[in-house]
Every structure is written in structure tokens, then in C-alpha cells.
């Protein structure tokens, strides 16, 4: 059973000690792990890890996460100017309406 759980495991910002301040910078609010993880794809998690390490000024680590994205179009979407700083875009990228509804809380 642990092999099945390991296979579905997605590494997230929560595995990298994300702080409340960093979440506010990334999303505009403090995210809860259970809501964040709801149907989270590996690419979205990698995109957020890229953005987290960019925020921390750790370019090498950020680029390592970027290189793991599944397609060039995903890489372009994540690095597109202005997109990563836009709260609405961030909410829509995650595709989780629960997140969008709580964006102003």
C-alpha cells in the first residue's frame, strides 16, 4: 500500500517550509494544505515550487523545478511575465474554485 501512496505523492511548497508571508506573496492569502492539495497536479506543484524559490532568490533551485515540468508550454506559462504575480491568474491556474472563493479571506 505504501508503494501506491508514494506513486501518487506530489511534492509541494509545504514540503519546503513555505511561510505565511511567502504564501501571501504567492497567492495573496494563507493557503491551507488540504485545500491546496485538492486535485493538485504535479505540474502546478512544480510551478509553485519554482515561484517559491524565485521569491526566495534561489535561482538554481527554481530552475531545477522548472526543468521538471512536463512540457515547454507549461514552462512558458509559469515564467510568463506578470502571470506569477497576478492573484486571479494564480487561482485560475490551480483550477480549484474553493481557492478562488477564499482569495479575499
Image (spheres, rainbow, N blue to C red):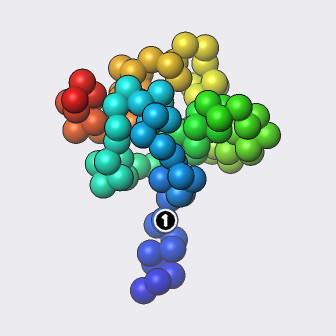
Seen at 48% across and 53% down, the residue is 14
Q: Position of residue 89 (x, y in %)?
A: 41, 21
Taking 98 as reference, is 34 left or right?
right
Most extreme residue toward the right is: 60
- Residue at image coords 46%, 78%: 4
Q: Nearest the camera: 65 or 26?
A: 26
The 10 Å Cα crowd at callout 1, few under 14, some 14 to 19, many 20 or more, is: few
- Between 82 and 53, the residue placed more toward the observer is 53
Q: Which quadrant would the N terminus be assigned to in this image?
A: bottom left
Can residue 79 be seen in this snapshot?
A: yes
Q: Position of residue 61 (x, y in %)?
A: 73, 44
Asked which secondary structure carries label 1, the reply is: loop
Name above or below for residue 3 compared with residue 81: below
Q: Is residue 3 left or right of residue 93?
A: right
Quadrant of the snapshot with the C terminus: top left
Across and down, in percent, residue 63 comes to 74, 38
Amino acid at each position: 500500500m505504501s508503494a501506491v501512496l508514494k506513486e501518487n505523492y506530489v511534492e509541494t511548497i509545504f514540503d519546503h517550509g513555505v511561510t505565511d508571508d511567502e504564501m501571501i506573496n504567492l497567492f495573496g492569502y494563507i493557503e491551507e494544505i488540504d485545500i491546496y492539495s485538492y486535485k493538485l497536479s504535479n505540474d502546478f506543484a512544480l510551478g509553485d515550487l519554482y515561484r517559491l524559490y524565485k521569491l526566495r532568490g534561489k535561482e538554481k533551485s527554481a530552475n531545477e523545478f522548472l526543468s521538471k515540468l512536463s512540457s515547454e508550454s507549461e514552462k512558458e506559462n509559469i515564467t510568463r511575465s506578470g502571470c506569477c504575480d497576478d492573484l486571479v491568474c494564480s487561482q485560475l491556474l490551480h483550477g480549484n474554485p474553493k481557492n478562488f472563493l477564499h482569495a479575499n479571506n
